[in-house]
Structure formats: structure tokens, C-alpha cells
Image (spheres, rainbow, N blue to C red):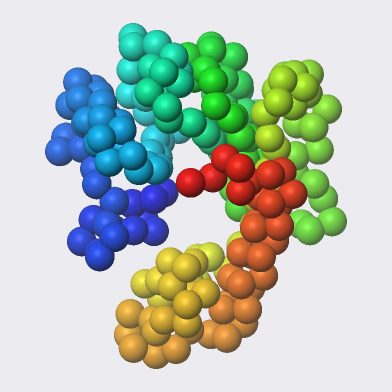
Amino acid sequence: MLSRLYPATSKYGVERPTSATLETSKVWLADILAQALQREASVIIDMGGGDRVSEELAEESNLGEFLSHSGLQPTYGYFTGPERDDFEHVHRIWNSGVFKGGQSVLILNAGLVRTHNSAVDPFAWLRKDSRYQEMASQGVKIIDMPALTCMKHIEGAGLTVFDAIDGKACSNGQPLNLLWVHMAKEWYNKLIIALESEGGKKWLP
């Protein structure tokens, strides 16, 4: 996701492992964490839903304890759509305990809903699930990320949502449809309100 928002060739491009092999990715992740410690800097690491690199490294190294002793305050973000398989994968990782310490955040991404209907809560079933309730009772912050239904038009214009918010021109040099700009700003404002209502300033970099 981050590499889509910040391509490697852009000014603030996201670094990626040189290859997708498990060992290469684990070494890359370990190096990134070491750099953050040396520079006393914040770092955001985006791991794909099916990527076991961070999970295996955390299990092998007792990562949570290492980060705590090193003075890093980790925030573990778990993203899920409304599909049951999505949440089961998230809960399995969280319940494994490999990511200890810090703050855990569960983001309910309404943008992954297959058919949008603003009158229906796509996560209604999840809010009643005992596993979800267990996570909430143990201090996991719950963030509702609204859907941005015009995202396909923004991406089709060669832009990211942040490009749209900043008023950048489309890849063909034409201005983006003003309605898409308005919707992007509304989406961003709702997301910020959701984050701040859960104390996001305390655990975001």
C-alpha cells in the first residue's frame, strides 16, 4: 500500500527489499529497524496481508522485547476488510502474541467492501464477534476507515489520494474532477477524526 502512495522513484519513495525471498526480506527488515534505532527516527513498515516476514522475524527474535529494551515504542496496525477470512488472518497473528508491547490498532477498511451501501454497516457481524470483542477488551484501538468510492477514478488519473487532496493535476495535465477532490478531502477528514478520537497522536509517529 505505501509503495503505491510513495513509489520508489518519487522524492520520498518507499524502500523495498531487493528480492521477495524470505531470508532477503528478513535481513532487510532487520536493517531498517537498526537504522531507526541509530537515527532515533520513526519508521513505518508496511507488510502485505499474506507476508509472513515480519511475523517470522518477530517470533525468532522476540521482537517486542527487543523494541521495548531499545526504547522504540511500536504501534502494530492490523487492517481488515469485512470478509471473514480477512479478520481470521488478522486475529490469528494478533492472538499468536509475536507482536508484544506497544499499541495495537485494528483498522476496519470499508474501502474493501465489494458493494457499497451507506445504509448498511459491513462490519456489523464483526462487532458482535467474540474475537473482536476480546481484542477491544485488551486495549486494541478500533479505527473505522471510511470508503473512498471515487478512488478508482483518482488512481485512473494517475494520482494518489494525497495528490488529489493537494490539488495536483492528472497524469495528462488536466485538473482532477472537483467532485473527486471534494470526496478525497471529506474521506481524509473523517479518517483523521477517527484516529484522533482513539488517541492517535499518542501512538502515531
As rendered, which of 38 and 95 lies closer to the eye? Answer: 38
In the depicted structure, whether residue 199 falls above or below residue 75:
below
Q: How far across and down, in percent of the image, does residue 69 sit? A: 41, 18
Residue 139 seen in render: yes
Give the side of residue 174 with respect to residue 111, left or right: left
Residue at horizontal 20 percent and vertical 37 percent from the top: 17
Task: Classify residue 140 by image quadrant.
Answer: top right
Residue at horizontal 54 percent and vertical 20 percent from the top: 101
In the depicted structure, whether residue 49 falls above or below residue 195:
above
Give the side of residue 129 with respect to residue 168, left or right: right
Residue 83 seen in render: no
Q: How far across and down, in percent of the image, does residue 3 sit? A: 33, 51
Give the side of residue 92 with respect to residue 50, left or right: right
Task: Classify residue 183 by image quadrant.
Answer: bottom right
Residue at horizontal 43 percent and vertical 66 percent from the top: 160
In the depicted structure, whether residue 113 falls above or below residue 152:
above
Task: Classify residue 137 by image quadrant.
Answer: top right
Q: How far across and down, in percent of the image, does residue 156 sit? A: 42, 71
Q: Residue furthest left?
A: 18
Residue at horizontal 33 percent and vertical 24 percent from the top: 53
Q: How far across and down, in percent of the image, does residue 41 sit? A: 35, 43
Give the side of residue 190 with respect to residue 38, left or right: right
As rendered, which of 129 and 11 lies closer to the eye? Answer: 11
For the image, the number of numbered tags is 0
